[in-house]
């Protein structure tokens, strides 16, 4: 997992919980140096979520999902990846995500980026299929909600059946009609 994910995780925990909570987590992990360009084992990310959860009485999955919702509104993500945020609405932003994940992980030797397929079924709808051996379907949904927050939009998400392994398919309806239906 790319180091930038941990750098943002620190920002998330400190802003949503506290510096104290984050301090304990990093201490229990043995004070690893977190650098943006580093590469870290997925297990460390799960452990970090577990350690936050323990302190605030939530499950590791709750923390991961909260992180997903936070990620697209993070000031640091918006600064570092500014060029990807020039899209005019949440749908346009999401339609660029397959390209973004493929591109930014090219330089990491063992990166396994998630991939996305799209079916543009209506101006205010988008079917999006997430594929990853990590199978983080709920995390993916929370990221979509975070993108809506970022663009001051509301969306509804309906899970759809998907027969392919390691996939999670959803239908997103963009509820701010004025941005989509002319
Ligand atoms: C500009 C915004 C974004 C950037 C820069 C970004 C970047 C990244 C990076 C670097 C990883 C780690 C990949 C690895 O180490 O293998 C990752 C993971 C992930 N990203 Fe993004 N991401 C962004 C937005 C999104 C959005 C909007 C979604 C979903 C709609 C998404 C879904 C995921 C998921 C589900 C993972 C977990 C890895 C997996 O499932 O295999 N990301 N992202």
Image (cartoon, helix red, strand yellow):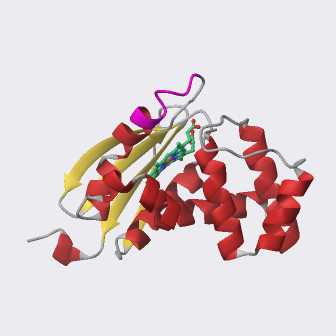
Tell me: residue 40, above or below residue 93: above
The residue positioned 44% from the left and 37% from the top of the image is 104
Tell me: residue 168, above or below residue 76: above
Q: Position of residue 13 (x, y in %)?
A: 70, 67
Q: Position of residue 106 (x, y in %)?
A: 46, 27
The residue positioned 73% from the left and 35% from the top of the image is 41
Q: Position of residue 109 (x, y in %)?
A: 57, 22
- The question of residue 86 being in magenta is answered with no
User: Quarter-wise, where is residue 175 in the image?
Assistant: bottom left
Q: Position of residue 7 (x, y in %)?
A: 64, 53
**Residue 24 visible from this viewpoint:** yes
Q: Nearer the viewer, residue 109 or 140?
A: 109
Q: Which residues are magenta?
A: 103-109
Q: Nearer the viewer, residue 109 or 95?
A: 109
Q: Is residue 49 left or right of residue 111?
A: right
Q: Is residue 172 left or right of residue 60?
A: left
Tell me: residue 131, above or below residue 63: above
In this view, which residue lies farthest toward the top? 109
Q: Is residue 145 left or right of residue 7?
A: left
Secondary structure mostly seen in the magenta stretch: loop
Quadrant for the N terminus, please.
top right
Q: Is residue 133 left or right of residue 100?
A: right
Q: Nearer the viewer, residue 166 or 75?
A: 75
The residue positioned 77% from the left and 45% from the top of the image is 33
Quadrant for the C terminus, please.
bottom left
The residue positioned 84% from the left and 59% from the top of the image is 25
């Amino acid at each position: 997992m790319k180091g930038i994910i941990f750098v943002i995780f620190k920002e998330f925990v400190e802003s949503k919980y506290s510096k104290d909570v984050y301090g304990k987590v990093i201490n229990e992990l043995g004070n690893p140096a977190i650098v943006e360009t580093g590469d870290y084992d997925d297990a460390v990310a799960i452990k970090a979520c577990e350690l936050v959860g323990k302190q605030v009485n939530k499950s590791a999955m709750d923390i991961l999902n909260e992180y997903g919702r936070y990620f697209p509104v993070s000031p640091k993500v918006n600064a570092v990846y500014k060029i990807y945020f020039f899209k005019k609405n949440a749908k346009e932003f999401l339609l660029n995500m397959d390209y973004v994940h493929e591109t930014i992980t090219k330089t990491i030797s063992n990166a396994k980026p998630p991939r996305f397929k799209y079916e543009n079924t209506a101006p205010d709808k988008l079917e999006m299929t997430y594929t990853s051996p990590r199978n983080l379907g709920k995390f993916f949904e929370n990221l979509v909600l975070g993108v809506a927050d970022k663009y001051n939009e509301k969306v509804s998400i309906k899970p759809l059946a998907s027969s392919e392994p390691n996939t999670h398919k959803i239908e997103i309806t963009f509820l701010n009609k004025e941005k989509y239906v002319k």
